[in-house]
Image (cartoon, rainbow, N blue to C red):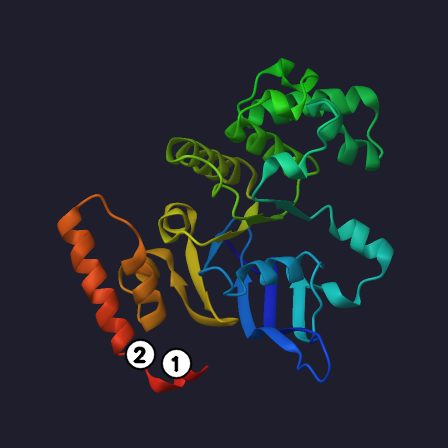
Amino acid sequence: MTGRILEVDDLVVEYPGRGFRARPFRALHDVSLHIRPGETLGLVGESGSGKTTLGRAVLGLAPVTAGSIRLDGREIGTLSRRDRRRLSQDLQVVFQDPYTSLNPVMSVGDILAEPLRAQGMSRAEAGERIRGLLDQVNLPADAGNRLPREFSGGQRQRVAIARALAIDPRLIVCDEPVSALDLTTQARVLTLFREIQERTGVAYLFISHDLAVVRAISHRVAVMHRGRLVEQGPAAVVTENPSDPYTQRLLLSAPVPDPVEQERRREERHRLARARPESELAS
């Protein structure tokens, strides 16, 4: 893994306030991170921490107030409409709910054909590519003839992954892609993500509130709290020996099957909460 496919520097995202004299809401405060080709950066935090806002900013769906986002050296905010379309070839997304992100009246084959035909691929070429994509995500060849509602949640997420892979992107933003799945299906989809990365070298920005999920798939982990990046580093270090108090509390909040260990974590979490600095309580 050399170079950087994604570079985010001092990123600020603000939304206008609502109502008379309302102050703007700052969702991200000077966030900086990077992702190398073929690498997974896990972005973790509780609801409202700003992690999804960061993903939306990378995708060009959230306003950038200050700072910069570069994909393969190209500044996303300064690209023309034509260059943004070209950029979409390198940048794709897998959302949390595959059912709402897939057109329910289109067959899976037609869903996968859309980005291929948009790139000028012939019907025959697209058909061959679709068969390869279905095989890549471990779906049967006849899946292309079926509608999304005919699949389970895990299978629909595989369709969404296949669509994201259709035009060979270099980076995929994965926004809570397994949170709606049961634990067994989660494990299978995470394994699929890893296998695809090993075969293709695609990079992931993997967004999740679940530290265990992030630990299972990430090379490095970045932790967000109240719009700020509070800690980042190798996955093993951040998830097993975190230095920031917020990350420590996040780790202690993760459920474990042992009731004695669960009670110990609960008491330690409460101790850390009581020891929280006044500056954090006031922020």
Q: Nearer the viewer, residue 110 or 272?
A: 272
Horizontal side of 127 relative to 218 (left or right) equals right
Residue pointed to by mark 2: 276
Estimate the x, y position of residue 65 in percent, counting from the top left: 70, 75
- Residue 281's label in the rendered image is 1
Estimate the x, y position of residue 85 in percent, counting from the top left: 80, 50
Look at the numbered disc 2 and give the secondary structure of its residue.
loop
Type of amino acid under label 2: Arg
- Residue 60's label in the rendered image is none
Among numbered discs 2 and 1, the one appearing first in the sequence: 2
Estimate the x, y position of residue 271 in percent, counting from the top left: 22, 72
Horizontal side of 123 relative to 55 (left or right) equals right
Q: Nearer the viewer, residue 149 or 171?
A: 149
- Vertical position of residue 196 compared to residue 209: above or below: above
- Vertical position of residue 92 compared to residue 23: above or below: above
Q: Kindly identify the residue that appears in the image at 27 percent across and 63 percent down.
A: 241
Regarding residue 10, the answer to whether it shows in the image is no
Q: CA distance from mark 2 to mark 1?
A: 7 Å
Q: Residue furthest left?
A: 260
Type of amino acid under label 1: Leu
